[in-house]
Image: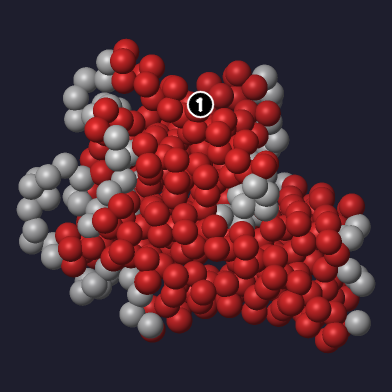
C-alpha cells in the first residue's frame, strides 16, 4: 500500500489527470463528468488497498487546498446570478433539512435495540450533520456527551456516506435529464455551455455569445503568466490568513463566511478580474479534493465501524434524498438546484460549491454557500430538537 503523503498526492493527481482525459475523449465519461469519475477512481484505489483510507494528504486537501480552490473560483463569479437562484435554493435546502430530520428519527426508532441507549444522541448528531455539514456532528456530540466509541464510529460512517452521496448527487441530474422530454435536460446541457438560468431554460440560445464561467474552469481565456500566479498566491494565502483570523476573533461566525466575502469583494477589483487561470486552477483543486473524498470511503471499514451505525447513516441520507428530490420535484424545483442544496445539507458549503463547480452550475455557487452557512447555524438547533424528541420516544 502507498502511504507516503507525497506519493498519495501523486496518485490523486494521476487520478484527476485520468478522469479529465476520459471526460474529454469518451462520451460516457463526458456524461459522468471528471468529478464523479475522480471520486469513483479514488474509491477503487482505496478499497483495493493501493492507497490508504486515511492520510495527511486528505486532511490538507479537505482544508487549505479546497478553500484555496473556492477562493479562486469565487474571483470569477458573477454576483448578479445570485438573485435568480437564491429563493429556489433556500426552498430546496429547507426541504432537504426536513428530510434529514425525518431520516434520523426513523433510523433511531428502527435501530435503537441494535445501537443501545445512546441512539437518541446519534439521531441528534446525524440530523445536525445532514442539515448543515460535518462541523455540526462534533458540536452536537460534545454537547450531548456522546461516548467516544460511538462518536468515532459515527464520524467514520458519516465520512463514507458523505462521499457516496456526493457521487449520487453528481449522477442524478445526468440520469434524469437524459430521459426524453425532461425539462432538466436543458439545465444539464448548460453545464457545457452557459451557467445562467436563461441559457438553461432556452436551449436555442447561442452559447458562444460570451465566455461562461464553466468554460473558464476548463481553459484560461489567455496565457497564464508569472504575474498572474504571483498575484493569485498572494490573494489566496492572504484570504485564508485573514478569514481564519476573523473566524477565531469573531467566533462562532464560521471562517468560510469571511473567506467568501473577501473573495467576492476582491473579485470586483479590475486587476484581480484581469488575472488569467483563476478558474482553471481553482477547479483543479476542487477535483483533487473530490478524488480524496472518494479515497476516504473504504467500504471494508463497515465491519470495523459496526453495521448498525452504517445503516443509521445510510438510512438517514436515503430518506433525505427521497424527500429533497421527491418533494422538490413536486414543488417544481430543478434537479441542479436540488443537487447543490442537498450537498449543502449533507456536506456543507464546500461540498455544495464543489458539486456546482464540477457540474457547471456556477449560478448556484453563491446560493449554495449561503444555505450551507445557514445550515451551520440551524443544524445544531434542529439536531438538539430531534435528539430530545427521539429520547422521549425510545427511552
**Picture quadrant of residue 242:** top right
Q: Mark 1 points at which residue?
A: 237
In front of the other: 26 or 311: 311
In front of the other: 310 or 248: 248
Is residue 130 shown left or right of residue 20?
right
Mark 1 Cα within 10 Å, few/some/many (few <14, many 20+)? some
Q: Which quarter of the image is occupied by the C terminus?
A: bottom right
Q: Which residue is painted at 18% across and 63% down in the image?
A: 198
* Label 1 residue SS: helix
**Picture quadrant of residue 107:** bottom right
User: x, y (%) of residue 278?
Assistant: 33, 31
- Colour style of the rendered protein structure: secondary structure
Q: From the viewer's perspective, is residue 84 above or below residue 154?
A: below
Q: Which residue is painted at 85% across and 80% down in the image?
A: 391
Q: Which residue is painted at 76% across and 57% down in the image?
A: 139
Q: Which quarter of the image is occupied by the N terminus?
A: top right
User: x, y (%) of residue 58?
Assistant: 62, 34
In front of the other: 242 or 1: 242
Residue 142 appears in the figure: yes
Give the farthest residue toward the front: 249
Q: From the viewer's perspective, is residue 388 above or below residue 162?
A: below
Q: From the viewer's perspective, is residue 4 above or below residue 65?
A: above
Is residue 31 shown left or right of residue 146?
left
Is residue 363 shown left or right of residue 257?
left
**Picture quadrant of residue 336:** bottom left
Q: How many labels does the image show?
A: 1
User: x, y (%) of residue 115?
Assistant: 86, 68
Give the farthest residue toward the top: 226
User: x, y (%) of residue 65?
Assistant: 53, 32
Is residue 33 shown left or right of residue 299?
left
Q: Which residue is painted at 60% across and 25% down in the image?
A: 8
Amino acid at each position: 500500500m502507498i502511504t507516503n503523503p507525497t506519493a498519495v498526492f501523486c496518485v490523486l493527481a494521476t487520478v484527476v489527470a485520468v478522469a479529465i482525459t476520459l471526460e474529454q475523449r469518451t462520451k460516457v465519461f463526458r456524461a459522468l463528468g471528471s468529478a464523479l469519475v475522480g471520486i469513483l477512481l479514488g474509491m477503487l484505489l482505496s478499497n483495493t488497498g493501493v492507497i490508504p483510507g486515511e492520510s495527511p494528504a486528505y486532511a490538507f486537501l479537505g482544508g487549505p487546498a479546497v478553500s484555496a480552490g473556492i477562493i479562486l473560483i469565487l474571483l470569477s463569479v458573477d454576483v448578479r446570478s445570485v438573485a435568480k437562484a437564491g429563493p429556489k435554493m433556500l426552498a430546496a435546502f429547507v426541504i432537504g433539512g426536513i428530510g434529514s430530520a425525518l431520516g434520523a428519527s426513523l433510523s433511531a426508532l428502527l435501530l435503537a435495540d441494535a445501537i443501545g441507549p445512546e441512539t437518541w444522541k446519534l439521531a441528534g448528531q446525524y440530523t445536525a450533520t445532514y442539515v448543515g455539514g460535518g462541523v455540526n456532528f462534533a458540536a452536537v456530540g460534545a454537547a450531548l456527551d456522546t461516548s467516544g466509541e460511538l462518536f468515532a464510529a459515527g464520524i467514520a460512517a458519516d465520512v463514507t456516506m458523505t462521499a457516496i452521496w456526493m457521487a449520487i448527487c453528481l449522477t442524478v441530474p445526468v440520469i434524469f435529464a437524459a430521459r426524453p422530454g425532461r425539462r432538466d435536460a436543458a439545465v444539464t446541457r448548460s453545464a457545457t455551455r452557459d451557467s445562467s438560468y436563461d441559457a438553461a431554460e432556452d436551449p436555442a440560445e447561442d452559447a458562444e455569445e460570451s465566455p461562461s464561467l464553466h468554460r473558464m474552469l476548463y481553459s484560461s481565456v489567455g496565457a497564464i503568466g508569472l504575474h498572474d500566479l504571483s498575484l493569485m498566491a498572494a490573494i489566496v494565502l492572504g484570504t485564508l490568513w485573514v478569514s481564519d483570523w476573523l473566524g477565531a476573533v469573531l467566533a462562532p461566525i464560521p471562517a468560510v463566511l469571511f473567506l467568501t466575502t473577501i473573495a467576492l469583494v476582491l473579485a470586483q477589483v479590475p486587476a484581480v478580474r484581469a488575472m488569467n487561470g483563476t478558474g482553471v486552477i481553482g477547479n483543479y483543486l476542487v477535483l483533487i479534493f473530490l478524488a480524496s473524498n472518494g479515497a476516504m470511503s473504504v467500504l471494508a471499514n463497515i465491519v470495523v465501524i459496526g453495521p448498525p451505525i452504517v445503516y443509521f447513516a445510510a438510512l438517514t441520507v436515503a430518506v433525505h434524498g427521497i424527500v429533497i428530490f421527491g418533494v422538490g420535484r413536486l414543488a417544481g424545483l430543478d434537479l441542479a438546484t436540488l443537487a447543490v442544496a442537498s450537498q449543502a445539507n449533507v456536506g456543507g458549503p464546500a461540498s455544495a460549491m464543489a458539486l456546482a463547480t464540477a457540474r457547471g452550475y456556477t449560478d448556484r455557487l453563491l446560493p449554495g454557500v449561503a444555505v450551507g452557512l445557514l445550515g451551520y447555524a440551524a443544524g445544531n438547533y434542529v439536531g438538539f430538537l430531534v435528539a430530545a424528541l427521539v429520547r422521549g420516544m425510545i427511552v
